Amino acid sequence: MRNKILYFLIFAAFLISCNDDSMNRYPLTSISGETFWNTENDLMVYNNVFYNYAKSNAMRLLNGNHEGATRDGQYSLDGMTDNDVRALSYNGNHVRIRAGQITPDNNPISFGWNRTCFYFVRAINIGLANYDKADISQSIIDQYKAEARLFRGWMVADKVSLYGDYPWIDKELNIDSDELFAERTPRETVMEKVLADLDYACEYLPDDWGDGSAPGRLNRWSALLIKSRVCLFEGTWRKYHGGTNPDSWLQAAATAAKELIDNGPYQLYSTGDPAHDYNAIFQMTDLTGVDEVMYWRRYEQGIVQNSWQIYYYMSTATKSMVEDYLCTDGLPITLSDLYQGDEVFENLFENRDPRLKQTILHPDDVEYYDYGGLTAIGTTIPNPTGKTGSWTSVTGYHQVKHVNQPQNVYFHDGFTPCVILRFGEALLNYAEAKAELGTLSQTDLDISINQLRDRVGMVHMDINNIPVDPRYTDWGVSPLIVEIRRERRIELFGEGFRFDDIRRWKLGEKLMTKKDYGIRWDEANRNSIDPAGAVSLQYEVVPGTGIEYICPNKGSDFENPVFESKHYLWPIPVSARSQNPTLGQNPGWE
């Protein structure tokens, strides 16, 4: 790094020395620090760069849906968890992480430890050092400072979630700066700095930039949602992994979410159609004016495109995921008399939370979701890998959330928008933070989780009548927290939250070491669904059931998922440590 910076400075000095008079002139054809930071437009244009950084694949901020050839889009991250199984030919990197095959010299994901993040922070710090030069009101300057600090706090918090201790840099560095070769800043010190950034953003960002919000800039309400997310992660991490003052972080999460719920201009999208409203925003091509969507990525053919649809066709839900949906009486399948079993595929959907049918494709909904092409070629649902048609599933559970057939253009020409921030998350963050604090009331449930349930016509969660699901009694938490976590898994499925949730709850060894199975595949189902014997997938008896189910990765290196205690934090890459040996290494990766 030093050599590259030194070369640049020497080259710049050489150009200047060619004409001594140039030392006394401002550049005539380029922007300079002396002539730039004057107007609001200057600050706005400068901050636009942050959005470009945040949309890059090096970030998990605004990166959206598989731009170009990347497979690390926001919606695909569930492939690293027990929610979703990927075909090895698509999103194989996620399968490797699921299987614990990550090493200090081979992190297959693009958004880890990378130089782009440090470039991003440097750009932010340069802005913060110059905004006050502008000849505009301080209140306007503070808005752009707040925007910059929101991005810095959000990005650094994400890196802390992955790596723990992380360098905190709040000024522009040069080749002689000691910080370039310093140790990582301790996690708790960094997070105090992050919280200060987020607090500043929540105080000084405008409620509305006046840009039409299509998708516009991040406003104060977005900052509150981001703050609630970051503080919930940090609070639960400290509670379950160890750390000081977890309750202060949980309270900050609850307070930020509550302000958004009480005073923000957002609400859940609902037209009174509980059978479709949950999935509706993920089927739209234009999210302008949708009250639930707080920030989204727009794509347009020929300008900025994505590959989301084709990759999501290769993503299929797990047996574990499908079985977590409650029955319509509010009880889990282990306790409810309404559960019809899985002997017949269609029976899985009977008397279940309507979000199941809006997430996993039911055979009767092929025409509703405009999958007419499947019917035309004789494809039936479920369609496990090996049968007819291009849309096959390695588990038999086809995901319909996010998948919009009319937008299914080939690979890199997609225009499906991506919901980055939505109001529904705030409701979940609030309920979980209050439950972890031990202060959750029925009123709290009614303004949060029960709002989500009302949209789909599900019975309310009753704080005095929480079911005890025997599958989760070994989690070490109350049945109330179990059910709030279940609600989060259901509502946010396929939106990229599960990987972080499992890690912050310290449940990796319990949830990420169990095989991922698909649909029931006993002799009766094989004969019914695949009479020609075309399916190429393996199957086995699931322990404790005596019943055969599809085992998607059977016989591969990924058959048995691995999660060790060291996997809660990722390793510092060899390349980074070779440049700065004082970075050290996370436990277990030495």
Image (tube, helix red, strand yellow):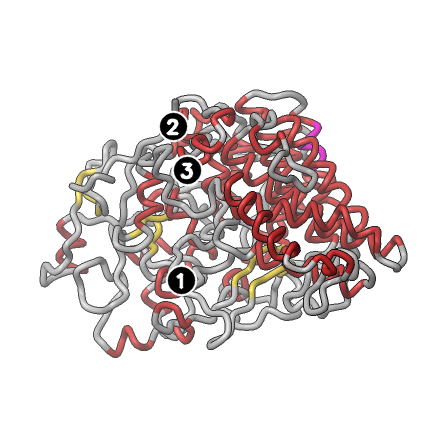
Q: Earlier in the sequence, mark 1 or mark 3?
A: 3
| Nearer-the-camera pick, 322 or 392 | 392
Query: What x and y, as percent, mark residue 526?
Result: 15, 54
Q: Earlier in the sequence, mark 3 or mark 2?
A: 3
Q: Quarter-wise, where is residue 457 in the image?
A: bottom right
Looking at the rendered structure, the secondary structure element under dot 1 is: loop
Q: Is residue 331 visible?
A: no
**Amino acid type, mark 2:** Glu
Depth-wise, is mark 3 or mark 2 nearer the camera? Answer: 2
Looking at the rendered structure, the secondary structure element under dot 2 is: helix
Above or below for 539 versus 349: above
Q: Which residue is mark 2?
A: 509
Q: Earlier in the sequence, mark 2 or mark 1?
A: 1
What crowding class fits label 3: few (fewer than 14 Cα within 10 Å), some (14-19), or many (20 or more)? some
Q: Which residue is mark 1?
A: 400
Q: Is residue 414 magenta?
A: no
| Nearer-the-camera pick, 22 or 96 | 22
Query: What x and y, as percent, mark residue 400?
Result: 40, 62
Q: How many marks?
A: 3
Specify whether 142 is left or right of 159. right
Q: Which residue is mark 3?
A: 335
Query: What x and y, as percent, mark residue 26?
Result: 76, 62
Specify whether 475 is left or right of 310. right
The prevailing secondary structure element of the residues shown in magenta is helix
Residues shaded magenta? 248-253
Q: Quarter-wise, where is residue 169 in the image?
A: top right
Query: What x and y, as percent, mark residue 459?
Result: 56, 49
